[in-house]
Structures are given as structure tokens and as C-alpha cells.
Image: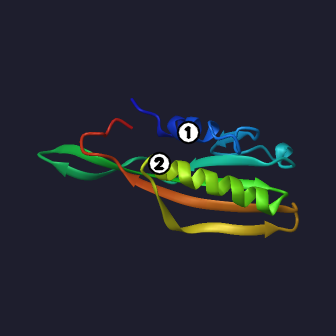
Amino acid sequence: MKDMLNTIYTEIRGDPLVSPYPIKYYDYPEAALKETFVLIKPLTPPMSVLGASDKELAQQLSYQIDVQSGDRMLCKQIQQAVKEHMYSLGFSQLPEGLDEFFSDTKRYVDARRYRMITNIYDVDY
């Protein structure tokens, strides 16, 4: 079985701009919110999008990647690097997302959503 979360993590972790910062799955503990970090969250489980003769032939994979930081430009630079890696994996960016400053935590958040449809017969996710 393939693990796209791990594939994304490994791809992003290899970037020199991203590698100094923690990358987490699903959620991040509030106690660590003082640092810059990247969060990878599946938006949905893998979904069948193409089938024939009662067989699944392709899947749709959707993820949201958040970058949070106290530094707005660092947040944007990391997200740009993430976007390039997601494109290299075959994902495209969706129109939804978040670009906010939260005054209560004094943090910038840039959250972008990505989606891909796997190649035919690549359904082991």
C-alpha cells in the first residue's frame, strides 16, 4: 500500500528552506505554536474517480498544507517551496485556502489545498 502523506512529507522535507522547521500530520499541539511549522492534512480519504468492469482505475487525492509562522515573508517563502514540490508530485492547487493573520496568536497562516488524480491503475492508497 502507498502512503501519500509520507510521500508529500519526504518531498517537502528535502527542501533546504523547509527542512529546519517541523512538519506534522493532521494536527499540531498548541504548546508548540510559537515556532514556524508545516501541517499536512488530508481533506478526504482517497476517492474512486474512474472505474470500469467493476474495477477502480484511478483515485482522487486531496490535501491541505498549512504553513504557520510569526514571520509573514517566511510563511510565504515556505508555502511557495511547498507549492513547487506539490506540482512536481502531480498535484494542482485548488481555489480554496486561507491567508490570514491571527491577532490573538500573532501568527500568519497560509493554507493551500491541492488535488491530484492518480494515473490509471495507480489505486493502492
The image quadrant where one finds the N terminus is top left
Give the image location of residue 87, x and y in percent: 48, 53
The image quadrant where one finds the C terminus is top left
Q: Is residue 3 placed above or below 37 in the rendered structure? A: above
Q: Which mark is residue 94?
A: none
Q: Is residue 114 placed above or below 31 in the rendered structure? A: below
Q: Residue at x 46, y 34 (%)?
A: 3
Within-10-Å neighbours for mark 1: few <14, some 14–19, many 20+: some
Q: Secondary structure at mark 1?
A: helix
Give the image location of residue 28, x and y in percent: 73, 45
The kind of residue on which mark 1 rests is Glu
Whether the residues at callouts 1 and 2 have beta carbons within 8 Å, the answer is yes
Q: Residue at x 62, y 36 (%)?
A: 14
Give the image location of residue 73, x and y in percent: 78, 61
Location of mark 1 (residue): 11
Q: Residue at x 64, y 60 (%)?
A: 111
Q: Residue at x 51, y 50 (%)?
A: 86
Q: Is residue 84 placed above or below 29 in the rendered structure? A: below
Within-10-Å neighbours for mark 2: few <14, some 14–19, many 20+: few
Give the image location of residue 89, x and y in percent: 45, 46
Q: Quadrant of residue 121?
A: top left
Q: Is residue 94 left or right of residue 110?
A: left
Frontmost residue, 25 versus 76: 76
Say whether residue 64 is visible.
no
The kind of residue on which mark 2 rests is Ser
Residue at the left extreme of this rendering: 53
Rounded to the nearest whole Å, what is the CA distance between mark 1 and mark 2? 9 Å
Location of mark 2 (residue): 88
Residue at the top extreme of this rendering: 1
Frontmost residue, 83 versus 111: 83
